[in-house]
Amino acid sequence: MNVSIIGASTTKFGELWSVSPRTLAHEAMDGALKDAAMKPRDIQALFVGNMLSGMLGGQEHLGAFFAEELGFTHAAAFKVEGACASGGLAIHNAFNAIASGQYETVAVLGVEKMTDHKPEDVATALMGAGTAQERSSGCTFPGLYAILARIHMQEYGTTQEDLAAVAVKNHFHASLNPNAQFRSLLTIEQVLRSHAVADPLKLLDCSPISDGAAALILSRKKVNGKREKEIEIVASAVATDTLGLAQRESLTELAASQEAARRAYAIAGVGPRDIDIAEVHDCFTIAEILALEDIGFYRKGMAARAISRGEVTLGKAKKLVVNPSGGLKGCGHPIGATGVKQVVELVTQLRGVAGARQVKGARVGLAHNVGGSGATAVAHILKS
Amino acid sequence: MLSPVKLWRNQKNVGKMLGKIGKIISWTMVRVPPADFSDQAPYPVVLVELSGGERITAQLVDPPAGGQAGKEKLMGMKVITVVRRTIKPNNEGVIPYGIKVKPC
């Protein structure tokens, strides 16, 4: 059964101290419903992507919580959790709920409220995505990706400047996105001069702590004719790997990303060369480099230099543009909202209404969402 | 959250991991730590390949010349697993111990 996205919306991402999770959810979902020309009563099931509502906010039972808040009375409702891949996993579940034939129209909400809490408490909560051994070592998520970065640097000669170039590109894209957390341009020197968080990663190699929500309305594709603005999900795939970094077979790649992408390409019948735009999981600058290699856009060890040369930058790229929204680095990273926002960005681009950051002629888009240090990966391919 | 029962159950496994030799294959210096580790930062966290092939993530204690100065020598350094207190005890008064590594 073909599944389409008929409504998509995102709130502004950022440090939104005056806004509650309820307000964020309403803003995103009201936008998506309006976009789809639907009413709350049309929604049969709700899939909420969120990681930290229990650990940080003390609120669980998010399915019922948001179904009530959004007026989806008696709708089936679920919280889907997979660390930073929670949003992508929620979309995967929503997709399958329609593909199974049980539902016709469902909603996805990705939401996270992080800035109400102290950074060290957020760091502790995020380590819930790792192993007991990683927690007991005092490591953090920047620390785990720093360990991956150092290995990549040693194996392929990736430099601190190559890492910085990812942040510079994504801030440039974010500067064109009115919903992005950071609208300011960066220079390589600024990234290199920012203080170390977990060597070799600097503050400006890291995505920020953010608040935000994003929403989608998914529906069974019309048999006769096409709805206006409809974008088809041609593949939705998930893969996992060991929870901890130390237990992985290889440390120069995220095998879950490779596997999720491979499955998605096979389902969609396309390959990396067919992709016009990709929203990839750049929680840290090294993560975008790993992603471009693992998804098959570049051979191992080739992505860093390509990004530095501007090969995937808006306005310079020959074809593929990576993270036109600004990515997690520039647009912000409210954990559960990120995977949903990536797909909202693809929808916006594929409809050709992305304004200043529009990738001209974009027809095929890929979203890549990672949980933890690579234990979960989700890939979606969309076509206009 | 520290649970005395959980500590009692898990610490029985600590002994099995002691005295193992390995080498550092990657490392970082954590400067923005999780809440319970605030009093220890900055500290090195290393990825170690033990002689049997198993890999572990652990805090490095007693680094040569301490912190920054020993930085360049960490890759490939030979280390041994030791038992150390991981974080300060909470109100329950149970002291959490775990595996760390030190140069050997």
Image (cartoon, coloured by chain):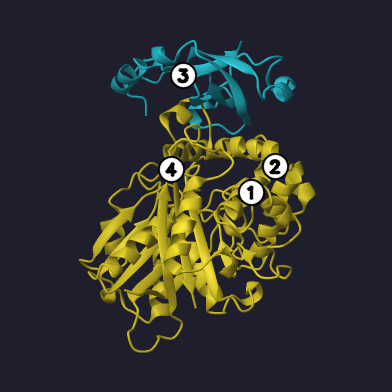
Determine the secondary structure under disc 2: helix
Tell me, yes or no, if residue A369 can be seen here: yes
Residue type, mark 4 in image = Asp
Residue type, mark 1 in image = Lys
Q: Colour of chain B?
A: cyan
Q: Residue at x 54, y 60 (%)?
A: A13
Vertical relation: B68 (above or below) A219? above
Residue type, mark 2 in image = Tyr
Q: Looking at the image, which residue sits at the far left?
A: A74
Report the disc number at residue A156: 2
Q: Residue at label 3?
A: B88
Q: Nearer the viewer, mark 2 or mark 3?
A: 2
Q: Residue at x 74, y 61 (%)?
A: A310
Q: Residue at x 76, y 48 (%)?
A: A190
Q: Chain of mark 4?
A: A
Q: Residue at label 1?
A: A300
Image position, residue B101 (x, y; %): 55, 17
